[in-house]
Each structure stands twice: as C-alpha cells, then as structure tokens.
Image: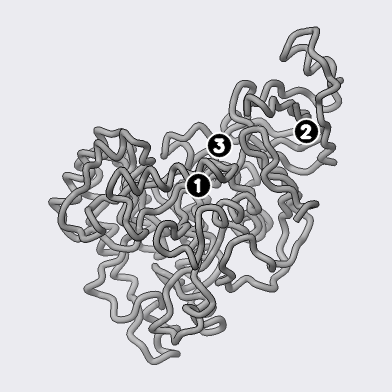
Amino acid sequence: MLLLKNGYMVDPASGTEGYRDILIDSDAGKIVRIASKGTPVAEMAGDALGQDACTDYVKEIDLNGQNVAPGLVDVHVHFRDPGFTYKEDIYTGAAAAAKGGFTSVVLMANTKPTVDNPETLAYVLNRGKETGIHVYSCANVTKGLQGKELTDMEMLGGQGAAGFTDDGIPLMDETLLREALRRAAKCGKPISLHEENPALIKNNGVNAGKAAAHFGIGGSPREAEIFMVERDLQIAAEEEADLSIQHISTKEAVELVRQAKKKSSHIFAEAAPHHFTLTEEAVIQYGTLAKMNPPLREEEDRLAVIEGLRDGTIDMIATDHAPHSAEEKAKSLTEAPSGIIGLETALSLGIRELVNKGYLSMMKLVEKMSFAPAKLYHLDAGYLAEGGPADLVVFDPKKEWVVKDFASKAANSPFVGETMPGVVGYTICGGKIVYCREMD
C-alpha cells in the first residue's frame, strides 16, 4: 500500500481543494481512503481494510504540500506506432506522458497501417497495456484516411476504440460526415475533427499573415478553419451527435463554438498549449520548430483561445503531441512536417500562461486537463475518490525546471531551454509509481 501524506488535493470532479492524506491499494489500483491531513496511518488502513489491517506494508511519501490531482488525460496524441516508430513509439510516448503527469492518453489513428481495422486497433491497445499508463486509441472515420468510405465503426467501437477521427485530414464529404456522426452516436463515441479546408491553403503550418509574408509563402489562411468549423457545427447539431473541434486556433472559430454550444449539448472543443501560448511571431523566430497544423495565429486569436478556456467555450486542453525526427524538422519550412511535441511541457504551460496570469484557477486548469476530456471520452479517469482509480499526478506549481532531456524520442519543441514553473514529482497510475522525478 502507498500513503501520500501532506498533499494539497485538487479534485475538479468533487470540487475538493485542501490538504489531504491519500491511501492507495497498489495491488488493486484503487484509492481506499482520503482523509484529513495527519490522520494516523493505522486509522486510515483500519477504516479502509478492517481493524486487523497491517500497516507494516504501507509505504509513506511525504508530499510536503505539493499539489496532488487526478492523473492528467490527453485525448489528442500521436505515438506514430505502427509505421513511424523512428519518430516515436507507444513505449516512448507513454514515458513522455508519464513524465508530464499524464496517466491516460487517446492516440490518433493516422498511423501506417491506419487504425481502420481490428488488427491494428488490437496491436495499439495491446502495446499500450505494457506501458504502465492507460493507452486508448481512436479509430479512423474513413478507410485509409481517404474520406471516401466509412470504416465499420460499430465493430471498431465494440473492440475498444475510444472515439473516431481522421485527424490530419478534414472530412470534406458532408453526406459522409452526417452518416459518420449518426453511427458514432449509436456507439456512444465522439467524433473529433481536424478543421482545415485544404482548398484554401497554399502552404500548411504557417499562418497566412505576417509569418507567411516573412518567408515569402502563401501560408494557411484563417478562413480554412472558419469554413470547416461553421459547417461541421451545424451538421453535428442537426444530427445530435458528440463532436469535438480539435486544436482550435482562430477567434472566429472560438465564437462559432460559443454560439453553437448555446443551442446544442453535443458540441465540444479542445485547445493545444501552443495555441494559447504562442503567435505566428514564433514561426519567424523558431522556423520549423513552430510549424504546426493549424498554424499559430495572431495575438487576438491567442487571447480568444484563452477567453474560450476561461468562459467554458473550450472544454479541454489537449497537446496534439506530434513527434518528428531532427532530420525532418531540419528541412526547409515548406518541406518540413508540421507539429511539435507537448506532453512534457503542457502542465507547465498551463500553469504559466493560464493560472499564473489569472485566467484560470488551478482547479479549472486541472479540470480541463483531466476530468473534462475523460468525461467526453467516457474514461474512468479524471477524479479522485475512495474506490476510484489510483491515477494521480503530484506536482509543485511554483518550483521551476528547464526544458531539456525529453523522455520522448523527439525534441521538436520551440520551448527547449526555457525555464518553466510546475515540476511533476510523481505520476501514479493504477496505484503504481510510473514516474518519479528523483529517479529521472
């Protein structure tokens, strides 16, 4: 058994905030007792397991006032496995997640082969079971990401797909999207959509504004996102199916979601840390390390994303962890792939940009990084309760660290070398310590 003493508990599901001691049954992977700070271990174990419970096997960790919260949940990550394991694999991706405080992740399905069949889905889920954290996966909406024929969504949902997405490629066929939403709704699974109209994009990954002009390229205009978001929100509302707008980047799209949520309870949205932290100026400074889809936009867009998080328009923070090799990112701006890694910096960026600047409370940040995404994807995660899963993150929001030495295979991040607040001390999943900073 494991006893976390003197931790400052932040649980968005119950609204609990304050000093607590938490007793964990490491064998069962459950929280057995949450008690007031300083409750004798014999009393805690006895109450939970019976008066004859032996305390000799209780390992105590004094958290010295560090925050203890539900293990973080990221519903938008790329582990590149199968097919692109030189960038990342399920094991290294899971290690990066654990180091960042995440105990549950949902993988995107743009692998090779794609997750449009039961064999590939089983491969991913079985590998995930070997990692120490909870690894879930979406399945594709369309076969081979071709946007022409729907996968057997009912079968894939029944075999464990957490949701459906063709992330990286928008669904242009409206009729196909309507049918996909209907079938996903019958499965009780969300569909998440990458919202960029390729017909409007000359060069992806760079905003069609100051950054594109600096490099003398066409770039990706905001209209590409606005067009798709407006269309898809309307379709989802009509079909009464859960739809998540992925990595929202424009102020207009945030407002479209805000208005759509007033009419439908099926509309959700996620924001990536880079979109509430950086603007297109970063592309000029960092080049390909700040190239991503959708691209970094203008300051007004960044602030709109933050306001969307603040007022509840944007439900979740999701990293879009997108590892690439150094050789790939060393190519020219128009040839290098889009995306940055994010699992190991997300919590710190949330603390620095949202909590420390007064936009969100710590409780709200934890909610958007655990409880809210878990709820949308129907995961048993994102909360701390007696009898609930022993998935926790322990972190010091004031202690600082330098961004370097990633657990990920990749290092494609514009934040390398920066000093950030929010040091993860422990990540505990299923009652087991899967990351400890002292051992890093």
Which residue does the numbered mark 3 point to in the structure image?
382
Q: Which residue: 79% across, 56% down?
A: 399
In this view, the residue farthest toward the top is 51
Q: Residue 239: x percent and y percent?
A: 20, 40
Up-down relation of residue 188 to residue 66 (above or below) = above
Q: Residue 195: x percent and y percent?
A: 31, 61
Residue 301 horizontal side relative to residue 149, left or right: right
Which residue does the numbered mark 2 point to in the structure image?
4
Badge 2, how many Cα within 10 Å: few under 14, some, many 20+?
many
In the image, 51 versus 219, the foreground residue is 51
Up-down relation of residue 124 to residue 320 (above or below) = above
Q: For the residue marked with disc 2, what is the amino acid?
A: Leu
Q: Secondary structure at mark 3?
A: loop
Answer with the quarter of the image where residue 345 lies: bottom right
Q: Secondary structure at mark 1?
A: strand
Which residue does the numbered mark 1 point to in the structure image?
105
Q: Residue 91: x percent and y percent?
A: 55, 53
> Residue 330, labelled with which disc?
none
Q: For the residue marked with disc 1, what is the amino acid?
A: Val
Q: Is residue 414 visible?
A: yes
Q: Quadrant of the C terminus?
A: bottom right
